[in-house]
Amino acid sequence: MTTDPILSIRGLRKSFGAAEIIRGIDLELRAGERHALIGPNGAGKSTLFHLISGNLLPSAGEIVLDGEHIEGWTPERVNRRGLARSFQITNIFPKLSVFENVRIAVMQRHRLEYNFWRRIERMGSIREATERLLERVRLQHQASTLAGEMTYSAQRSLELAMTLASDPQVVLLDEPMAGMSSEETHYTAELIREVTAGRTLLLVEHDMDVVFSLGERVSVLVYGQVIATGTPDEIRRHQGVREAYLGEEHEA
């Protein structure tokens, strides 16, 4: 892992009318690191993800991906530039098979979603790429299963495969362990560690065990501002973080 930032956020702001949700965020992600973002509900974590991935336009500030300004870009253009994200709510096609879900994501990477002139079954490279992704997330044995009939944790693994289909440099995962049992959480955390190796990961998660085991650095977002960034041990010892967030979590 290098120390060069692959994603730089400078002076980022987002207002909805008179309400300022993101209030001047500065944040850098180093190439190849796993970076966790924590904060209480309403801190602006999902809004920040929307801004980075192009789902929302910033009111002010800069977002620089691998040396190129991407603020104001469409989500599709951001994705093609090398950044992919998942959402809090599972984003799959429940009436299609696991294989078909991943194949659609692979086809989008190759810009083949509107190709009517060639049978999909004959596109060997698409099929092979789909099979490799299913193996990576350990779903190869459920390839023919309808996505809507899978367990919740398996659906999140499927969504992870679809997120990785564009072969992104930077991966944003928004609460991937939400709603899972402790066993499912452990399995998914290890899977994320495995499949994001060599990529830059920005993870939003409320499970502190996951945050401190996966995150090489942790940033704390409170009321639309980053109040601290550091290693898990530094964040644990940070008095301001304990008062603003961790202390409340521990008491709960």
Image (tube, grey):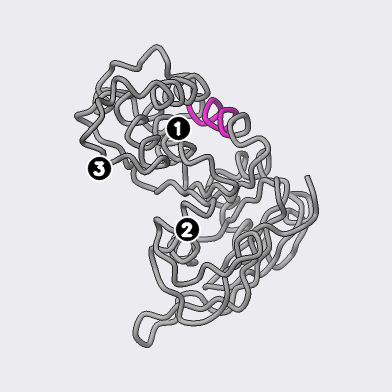
Cα separation between marks 2 and 1:
18 Å
| Rendered residue at 29%/41% (across/down) | 113
Cα separation between marks 3 and 1:
21 Å
According to the image, label 3 marks what residue?
114
Residue 56 x, y percent position in the rendering? 39, 68
Three-letter code, disc 2? Val
Q: Residue furthest front?
A: 117
Query: Quarter of the image holding residue 131?
Result: top left
Residue 224 x, y percent position in the rendering? 53, 72
Choose mark 2 or mark 1, whichever is in front.
Answer: 2
| Rendered residue at 51%/29% (across/down) | 182
Q: Earlier in the sequence, mark 3 or mark 1?
A: 3
Cα separation between marks 3 and 2:
20 Å
Main secondary-structure element of the magenta-colored stretch = helix
Residue 2 x, y percent position in the rendering? 80, 50
User: Is residue 75 positioned above or below 9 on the image?
Assistant: above
Instruction: Name the element at disc 1.
Output: helix
Q: Which residues are magenta?
A: 184-192
Three-letter code, disc 1? Ala
According to the image, label 2 marks what residue?
78
Q: Earlier in the sequence, mark 3 or mark 2?
A: 2
According to the image, label 1 marks what residue?
161
Q: Estimate how packed mark 1 is, as few (under 14), some (14 to 19) or many (20 or more) residues with alpha carbons within 10 Å.
A: many
| Rendered residue at 45%/32% (across/down) | 161
Magenta-span inclusion, residue 99: no
